[in-house]
Image (tube, rainbow, N blue to C red):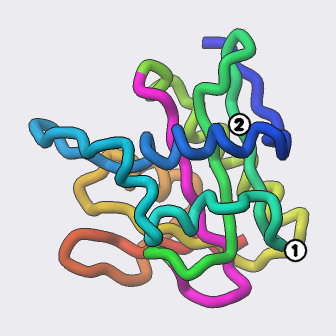
Amino acid sequence: MEYKIRELKLEEAKVLDTFLYEAIYIPQGVASPSKEIINKPELQIYVEEFGSKNGDLCFVAEVDSLIVGAVWVRIMNDYGHIDDETPSFAISLLKDYRNYGIGTALMKKMLEELRNKGYKKASLAVQKVNYAVGMYKKVGFEIIDENEEEYIMICQL
């Protein structure tokens, strides 16, 4: 599948609402939550006024001019927060565009950008049963902590 990765334009920031919802891991056989779930404060921290904070970065993947995936980082007190200098990752793809390597390409692009900007590490939280755990390990993330449901992972840049 042919795709292009580019930086998100500020005027496109509202598209992150779609990708925030798509980032919610829903196990097989479990009903999808209402799209209103993204309005919860613990989820809004990922997208609220995106682009206005120092450290906000986002890349999107496009197929035929349609944004099909996004990876974004922000220094925030989210599930994967480890300190105030480490950006936390969020990534998702529309369902029809998963398993084509687009997510891996987005992750690698963002890690390269963070290195270039002088960051020392990046973090994320992921549910243990999420198939993406393997991809995160492949691009350099390591598990540093866990609770009953999630891993906290970091990538040394």
In the rendered image, which quarter is residue 115 located in? Answer: bottom right
Magenta stretch: residue 55 in it? no
Q: Residue at x 43, y 81 (%)?
A: 144
**Callouts 2 and 1 close, C-beta under 8 Å:** no
Q: Position of residue 155 (x, y in %)?
A: 60, 70
Q: Position of residue 154 (x, y in %)?
A: 55, 74
Q: Position of residue 39 (x, y in %)?
A: 45, 57
> In which quadrant of the rendered image does the C terminus lie?
bottom right
Q: Residue at x 67, y 18 (%)?
A: 66
Q: What residue would you read off at disc 1?
A: 118
**Residue 36 against residue 76 in the figure, above or below:** above
Q: Residue furthest left?
A: 29
Q: What residue would you read off at disc 2?
A: 60
In the rendered image, which quarter is residue 21 located in? Answer: top left
**7 displayed left or right of 152:** right
**11 displayed left or right of 1:** right
| Gap between marks 2 and 1 measured at Cα | 21 Å
Look at the numbered disc 1 and give the secondary structure of its residue: loop
Look at the numbered disc 2 and give the secondary structure of its residue: strand
* Label 2 or label 1, whichever comes before in sequence order: 2
Q: Amino acid at mark 1?
A: Gly
Q: Residues within 10 Å of mark 2 (few under 14, many from 20)?
A: many
**17 displayed left or right of 27:** right
Report the magenta residues as a range: 81-95
Q: Amino acid at mark 2?
A: Val
Q: Residue at x 19, y 45 (%)?
A: 27
